[in-house]
Image (tube, rainbow, N blue to C red):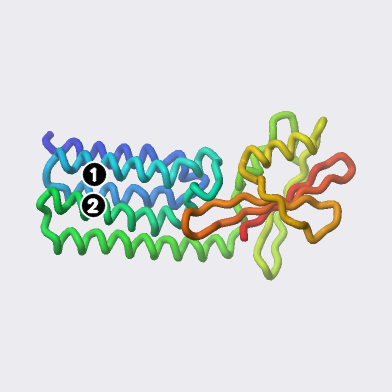
Amino acid sequence: MGHWWRWALVVAAVAVAVPSAGVAPTALFGVVPVAAWGCLARTRRVGVVVGVVLLVLLAWFALPHGLGWSGPWVPSPAELCWLYPLVAAVVCGIGGAVDGRSGCALSLSLTGVVLLGFLVALVDLAMLTESPPGDEGVLPAPPGLRVVDPDLVCGSGGCARQVGFAGDDARALVDAHLAAHGFVTHRPAAVPGTDLVCRVTGLLVRRQACAEVREAAGVVRVTWYVE
């Protein structure tokens, strides 16, 4: 029973990561540093304090994706794999020193977690390059509108998704919907009559999702992709 807090940290990490896993599957990797620390910590007091710090950091890295937030202060999904373990390693290193943990064992364990994180980030990047974008806040549809003609468009530069929205006052509702999900950066569009808006996430490495919006025959069509 004396080790209940180790399991509690892991369960809490899973509870933080799971809500975002549907949008950013890499969120589940955030459990690994917490679980590693749960195994490495020697005393309950230091173990719990450092564990709570790791959970707060994990919430910062993971939860915004599940909530659909964006902005330069929102870590990208890839950063959850490599930047979060790096920060966690520093926190665990300090905690291990206070806890009297062996420097060699602690260093090897944390190095393994960081290297695994970089590997997962590379795999995730390769998968994103070959796969179509996720919903990116464009879907589900704004209340009061219906989705028409969903489509997938692929070319040499990658894949984009396209969907139409129909209903009363569709253009205003779509514009407000996109703005509410972080598409606030306007850029020049290559096609006349099309609005191009983008949203950015990432602390150190920017990830940009863009949506092209145009209206024809009462249907607002949105094409979105990740750059």
Question: On screen, 131 above or below 73?
Answer: below
Q: Going 42% across and 41% down the picture, which residue do you hit?
A: 18
* Nearest to N terminus: mark 2 or mark 1: 1
**What is the C-alpha distance between the residues marked 2 and 1?**
7 Å
Residue density around tag 1, few if under 14, some if 14–19, many if 20 or more, within 10 Å? many
Residue named by callout 1: 50
The extreme bottom residue here reads: 156
Q: Locate residue 152, reporting x and y percent.
A: 70, 55
Q: Is residue 207 left or right of residue 192?
A: left
Q: Secondary structure at mark 1?
A: helix
- Quarter of the figure that contains the C terminus: bottom right
Q: Which mark is residue 223?
A: none
Q: Which residue is mark 2?
A: 92
Residue at image point 26% right, 48% down: 35
Kindly give the residue lying farthest to the right in the view shown: 217
What is the x, y in percent for residue 54? 30, 45
Amino acid at pointer 1: Val
Q: Disc 2 on helix, strand or loop?
A: helix
Q: Nearer the viewer, residue 123 or 183?
A: 183
Residue 8 relative to residue 102: left or right: right
Q: Residue at left 80%, top 43%?
A: 220
Amino acid at dot 2: Cys
**What residue appears at the point 54 percent right and 51 percent down from the top-left corner?**
201
Mark 2, Cα crowd under 10 Å, few <14 / some 14-19 / many 20+, is many
Image quarter (top left, top right, bottom left or bottom right) of the N terminus: top left
The answer to whether mark 2 and mark 1 are in CB contact below 8 A is yes
Residue 226 placement (x, y as % from top left): 62, 57
